[in-house]
Amino acid sequence: MSTNDILLGLGLVLALAVGSQLTGRLLGLPAIVVLLPAGFLAGALTDDVHPDQLLGALFQPFVSLAVGVILFEAGLRLSFDEIAPRVRGPVARLIAIGVTVTLVVVAAMTAALFSGMATGVAVLIGSILVVSGPTVVLPLLGFIRPAREVRTLLKWEGVLVDPVGALLGVLVFQGVQSGRVGGAVWHPGEFLGSMVVGAAVGAAGAAVLFVLLREVQRSAPAMVVSTTLAVVVGSVVISDLIREDTGFVAATLMGITLGNQHLLPVSRRVDVTAVLGFHEALVQLLIGVLFILIAASVTPDEVRHVLARSLVLVAVIVIVARPLAVMLAMWRSEFSFRERAFVAWLAPRGIVVGATASAFSLQLEQQGFAGAGQILPIVFIVIFATVVLYGLTAPPVARWLGVAGQERGLVLVVGGEAWARQVATAIQSAGASVRMWVGPAEDRDAARAAGIEAGRGGMLLDSVNREAELEEVTDALLLTRSDDFNALAAGELRRQLGHDHVFRVAPDPEAADLLPPPNDTLSIGSSELTHSELRRRVAAGWRIRTRDAATPAQPGDIALLVVAADGRVALHGTSARTGAPVVLCRPP
């Protein structure tokens, strides 16, 4: 390829990666459902995005490093605090039993469906397809928002099974090459050795990262992200050079270690807020790029040749392998039948599956193994079919089983004074769910007495736990007496909830210690309705209520917000949303 062809190819890959994710968001679909067909069509229509031509020998090392960064970021989100005792056993059994059952069922079915394929190749396909992974599970969980413990179970399984499955695939691949798989001897101790190598390098990398970040945060905070990225990549490389594909274990362990610093003394902890924020953006880009490249590497002819039999294999995975694995792994667990049924209906395949298949298929095909050329198209069809199937059906299945999170908006009200409770009560009466962050115990008790969920605020928690606190929140109202806190918290929450989803009480220009943001206009009511003014009016007999949209406004009433039919809130008069107005009513 010429320099211009490579430039065009790289531009197309990035544009498709980001554009597909934006399209998925606008259509209300998981982004992965759009990424795979976009990459496949791009690969069919042009050679410019084909990874072998675009990146050549750089492709496989890039995939290894990218997946390492993705697993590190996923590990950061695994908190031991969230994994309750009733979840730990099922997670361990899902990985151990699930991997074994899936490998046996998929390998046997592949050998039966694809006659003439070498036994070792069928076993390799079975070992590759045991992996699910955070690149597909976490976006779907974020989209579905199931019950907390179900989400925790699937999140831990999805993250931990990636390095386990990758190592298993490497060992089976080595066994196929040496003739041991399908033959006489295979040593499971090699798997344990690989886990030990990855864990040792990961532990050493985490220790180095703690030491470096502590110093960097003190003297050069702008370099926190680059330092973290360098240590993670370096650990993946060192681990892989010692033993192939053990870098995935090292990266995952490093992420889990940094994500669970609450187990360490306060003096030894480091702040990973900046790291998590940057890595989240980087990981989204890497996921998009990898899916586009891997999908583009499969040709329509390859897919057409194995399509019908591969779809039968998908049916067996979905209807037989996954339910059987879940039934055995969660037998006599405390999870209800409905929760187990949902877990059995969510096991999409992701990046590590495609990356492992693309790495192994070409080498075995060059060595003359029968059926090796079918590995990548079979795996691609399984990835695409499971992602589409689960992506489109898991949300309604979760609702049908009663394990889905609420579809309506959850409004967070920060502040516990009497008039703030009136705002929360009015929003709740309009059909939205409300949660309050309240300081004084008596104000929390008053909110609960009014039927509102209330707890201490989580703004100052570490980024991982704050993200969990805000998991279902769609909109936020900042109604505390501190204008400075409201302004700072609004800027922070808008990064997570989005602009036009965070509102605050109008600041008093004479009382605030800090200058207000020049472009912050999202204040409820009018600029005159400061905290002190609202408190004064409520004390004088004014009341905050929800008015039916069909009821005409009364003279002197002041509209504060509008609660839409889906439970979301917006400022009155600034949005196309229609719904029940929340108004400040003058005394009769």
Image: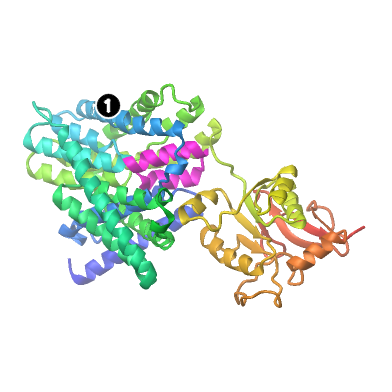
Q: Main secondary structure of the magenta part?
A: helix
Residue ID at (37%, 31%): 318
Does the magenta run of residues contain 145?
yes
Q: Position of residue 76 (x, y in %)?
A: 38, 51
Does the magenta run of residues contain 568?
no
Residue ID at (26%, 55%): 205
Q: Position of residue 439 (x, y in %)?
A: 65, 54
Q: Residues within 10 Å of mark 1 (few under 14, many from 20)?
A: some
Magenta stretch, residue numbers: 132-160
Quadrant for the C terminus in the image: bottom right
Q: Is residue 335 above or below residue 546?
A: above
Q: What residue would you read off at disc 1?
A: 105
Classify mark 1: helix, strand or loop. Answer: helix
Residue found at the far top of this picture: 332
* Residue 19 visible in the snapshot: no
| Nearest the eye: 235 or 213 | 213
Is 208 positioned to the left or the right of 338 in the image?
left
